[in-house]
Image (cartoon, rainbow, N blue to C red):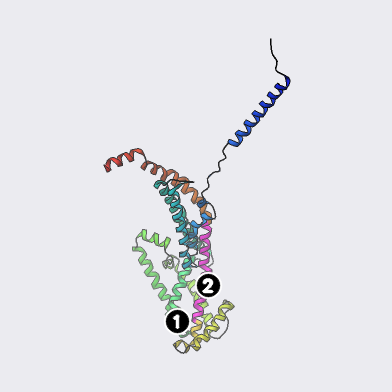
Amino acid sequence: MIKLAPNHVNANLKTLTFTSSSQKETNKKEEKPSFKAYEDPLLKWPTRGLAYTNEIGAAISEVAPKLGLALWAPALLYIGADVYDKYKSDKDSYNPDAKRGTKQAIFQGLASVLMPTGAVIAGQKLASVAAIAGKDGISLQTKEEITNFLSDFISRRELSEYKGKKTEFKKEFFEQLEHKRENLIRESKFENPIKTFFKMIFKRRHPEAMARNEKEKVSAYADKCIDRIFNMHEQLTANKKPKEMSNKLYNSFIKLQETYKQDKDLKISVNYLENAAADTIKRFEKSRLLKSTKLLKTIGGFVALGLAIKPIDKFVEKVIIEKLVEPNLNLLDSSEVKENKQKFLN
């Protein structure tokens, strides 16, 4: 005899079965862990940007040397913090590992210091060389060195003594310039090529640039600078504002006259007008040099840095670290090496 369960029992069982199955699915979803990929806070922007403050410093060193040097501090602090962080912890867990710290130190040294700084310097050099295509036909560096040489030449003389004697001034200047060029050419022939390379890359002043460019173009640019200086000196000593000079600098010239005129402790008070004119011209030339050469080189450095940051990061991480550094570090960390090391120590 077959005993059939009541309909209401079957209904309850069906309901129970359905409820149980639904609950299982819900539980599975609830039990499924949701992991969020670890993101290193030190490698996220804008924090990551601290690693490049030294490159910003290198880029602006042409226009603000002291600030450029100071900007190395945050970069070095960031790099030190990042290397220590990777040494002491494996992502989000405490696990000191010298191998991991070494790898990060190599990464930061290349990706945050050497290669970006090289990119900035290369950008500055390219901006300087690109100026050869301009109307003067010489590099920005050459213009800077000619201006510096002319400024040094003037500082050892009184422009007032050459009033109406511009030709004589030019004769003396170009004799000195030619002598300087000859010395630079002679010195370059005996200089160590490696020293020349590092000097070209890392040194800020490059007098040799005057020797590398064509003599006629160097002389033509210097001649134009001398004409401008004499013209400005003539107008300032007549209390007239030169066309090229800003109102701010001219007002500074007027105040400087009064300062020199009232200073009885200095001989400068006797020729206050001449000396105020000479000092104002020096300031004008320095400002002009900043705008016409140093600022353009700084822009070149920033452009190169902006273009190079991401490619450098990827190249260092994917090529140098993953293909060169990690395999060698793993080799040093192998059980065979440890065993041999232990045998040697014993």
Q: Position of residue 187 (x, y in %)?
A: 35, 66
Residue 302 within the segment the image draws in magenta: yes
Element carrying mark 2: helix
Farthest left residue? 346
Residue at x 46% of width, y 49% of height: 316
Name the one closer to the observer, 105 or 301. 105
Q: Would you place residue 328 above or below residue 51 in this image? A: above
Q: What residue type is disc 2 on?
A: Arg
Q: Which quadrant holds residue 114?
A: bottom left
Element carrying mark 1: helix
Residue 22 within the segment the image draws in magenta: no
Farthest right residue? 7
> Quadrant location of the C terminus?
top left
Classified by dominant secondary structure, the portion drawn in magenta counts as: helix
Q: Position of residue 55 (x, y in %)?
A: 48, 59
Q: Earlier in the sequence, mark 2 or mark 1?
A: 1
Residue 235 visible somewhere in the drawing: no
Q: What residue type is disc 1 on?
A: Glu
Farthest top residue? 1
Q: Judge the density around disc 2: few (<14), some (14-19), many (≥20) Cα neighbours within 10 Å.
A: some
Q: Which quadrant holds residue 343?
A: top left
Residue 334 visible somewhere in the drawing: yes
Residue at x 53% of width, y 58% of height: 303
Query: On residue 288, which mark appears?
Result: 2
Q: Magenta region: which residues?
A: 278-305
Q: Which residue has dot 1 on it?
A: 168
Query: On residue 20, which mark appears?
Result: none
> Quadrant location of the N terminus?
top right
| Left-right relation of 257 to 110 | right
Name the one closer to the observer, 264 or 167. 264
Residue at x 58% of width, y 36% of height: 31
